């Protein structure tokens, strides 16, 4: 038994920490989606004097700092571990979320959203670093599926919860409650996670985790393929987080509470599909199927089904529009855990999982910046939601093609020591 295996938590604590990571991600996504509900409220946009383009810029503010800190946070968790960096980031984003409810000027609102993004930048690199170190290949799909369930449940409940709190109280109190209640998560995190856990600190045996130069990572076509796929996948997801509430209220004339209901079912659909499809993929891998081929098949199928969002954009029927809104986002769940398992675990050497996850998540963050801004601009210039949703269709097709062509073992990041041994 290696020193690293000895450092791993026992089975019960390992799965408990995984669930806790999922809950942390859920709280993070509630914090980032609540702005979409506020921006669907006329009184909120009027108070801050926001146009459609202005709404897009405010929705994207979170992702400017989030994107800038992804690679640094990946380096931090690979070097210093998961436990304390995650705890510090968690406290920061919860306090900043609460502070949104205290802002009376647009400039202050933008600043606290930037701080929220900075705090949440730790979430993805830390989570995938921990999962990669604690789960085998034939468990990694379901592990990522459980973790991603938290992100999707957060997205599912974030909008309706925010809408309910706005209707029941006010938009300032909505931000304050969501921010402060989340802090209760810290106690079990500090109790369960140990600095000595594998994946919660520098690898104990550096010879088993050879250094991979950053240049080698960025030379990998597979990494660039994952960057494109992350962007395309998340462009649709972040459109749904930031603009779908306004689309349902303004274009489909739903009430704020009914809008929250359909947002909930859309994101719960993607969560459940992601969990089931990741379990099926794990079972196929366990029975001897090639993990790369299996997971690529699920990813491509997810992108293809998600393309049905264009049917919802072009119909005049409210019922059909709502049907395709749920089906398209739910179908994307086939790609959710499988593309992340493939791009951040299966094809990535363990010693740089945090760093590579940070690199890949920059494209996720860029999608969070581009989707709300481009949607706002297209809506304002075209006068409707058809043009923004046509852009989504284009990116989904690009994601499917990139997965088919670029996600190959031969193009994964190169470990220098492995190359030397082959040539010896």
Image (tube, helix red, strand yellow):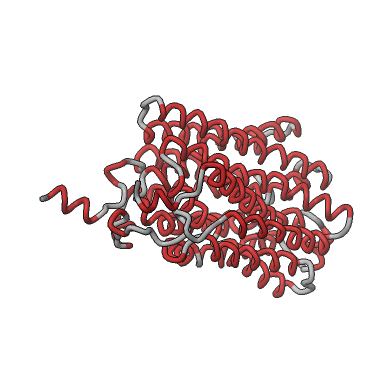
Can residue 387 be seen at all in this image of the molecule?
A: no
Image position, residue 254 (x, y; %)? 81, 42
Q: Give coordinates of residue 294: x percent, y percent.
A: 41, 31
Q: In percent of the image, x 71 and y 64: which residue is there?
A: 97
Tag count in the figure? 0
Give percent across and percent down for residue 318.
Answer: 76, 34
Q: Nearer the viewer, residue 299 or 357?
A: 357
The residue furthest top is: 287
In the image, residue 21 above or below residue 339: below
Q: Is residue 138 left or right of residue 270?
A: left
Tell whether 189 sits left or right of 6: right
User: Vertical placement of 335 versus 210: above or below?
Assistant: above
Q: Is residue 3 visible?
A: yes
Viewer-nearest residue: 205 or 126: 205
Residue at image coords 31%, 47%: 412
Quarter residue 105 falls in? bottom right
In front of the other: 316 or 90? 90
Image x and y of residue 208, in percent: 30, 53
Indicate left or right for 349 with 133 as reference. left
- The residue at the point 47 percent across, 44 percent down is 340
Outermost right residue: 168
353 vs 207, nearest the viewer: 207
């Amino acid at each position: 038994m290696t020193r690293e295996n000895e450092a791993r938590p026992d089975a019960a604590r390992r799965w408990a920490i995984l669930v806790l990571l999922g809950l942390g991600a859920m709280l993070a996504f509630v914090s980032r989606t609540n702005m979409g509900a506020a921006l669907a409220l006329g009184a909120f946009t009027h108070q801050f004097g926001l146009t459609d383009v202005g709404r897009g810029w405010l929705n994207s503010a979170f992702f400017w700092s989030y994107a800038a800190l992804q690679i640094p946070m990946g380096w931090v968790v690979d070097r210093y571990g998961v436990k304390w960096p995650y705890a510090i980031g968690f406290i920061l984003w919860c306090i900043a979320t609460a502070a949104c409810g205290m802002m009376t000027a647009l400039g202050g609102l933008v600043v606290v959203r930037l701080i929220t993004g900075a705090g949440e930048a730790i979430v993805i690199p830390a989570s995938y670093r921990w999962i990669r170190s604690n789960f085998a290949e034939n468990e990694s799909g379901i592990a990522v599926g459980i973790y991603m369930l938290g992100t999707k449940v957060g997205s599912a409940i974030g909008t309706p919860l925010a809408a309910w709190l706005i209707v029941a109280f006010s938009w300032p109190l909505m931000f304050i409650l969501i921010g402060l209640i989340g802090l209760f998560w810290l106690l079990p995190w500090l109790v369960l996670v140990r600095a000595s856990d594998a994946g919660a600190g520098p690898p104990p045996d550096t010879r088993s985790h050879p250094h991979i130069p950053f240049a080698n990572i960025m030379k990998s076509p597979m990494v660039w393929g994952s960057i494109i796929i992350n962007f395309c996948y998340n462009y649709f997801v972040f459109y749904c987080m930031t603009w779908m509430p306004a689309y349902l209220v303004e274009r489909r004339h739903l009430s704020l509470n009914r809008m929250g209901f359909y947002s909930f079912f859309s994101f719960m659909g993607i969560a459940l599909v992601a969990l089931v499809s990741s379990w099926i993929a794990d079972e196929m891998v366990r029975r001897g199927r090639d993990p790369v081929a299996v997971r690529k098949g699920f990813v491509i199928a997810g992108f293809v089904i998600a393309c049905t969002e264009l049917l919802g954009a072009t119909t005049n029927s409210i019922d059909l529009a709502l049907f395709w809104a749920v089906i398209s986002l739910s179908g994307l769940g086939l790609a959710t855990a499988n593309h992340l398992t493939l791009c951040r675990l299966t094809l990535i050497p363990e010693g740089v999982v945090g760093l590579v996850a940070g690199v890949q998540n920059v494209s996720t963050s860029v999608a969070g910046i581009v989707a709300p801004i481009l949607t706002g601009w297209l809506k304002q210039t075209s006068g409707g939601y058809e043009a923004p949703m046509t852009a989504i269709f284009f990116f989904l097709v690009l994601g499917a093609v990139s997965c088919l062509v670029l996600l190959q073992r031969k193009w994964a990041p190169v470990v220098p020591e492995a190359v030397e041994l082959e040539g010896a």
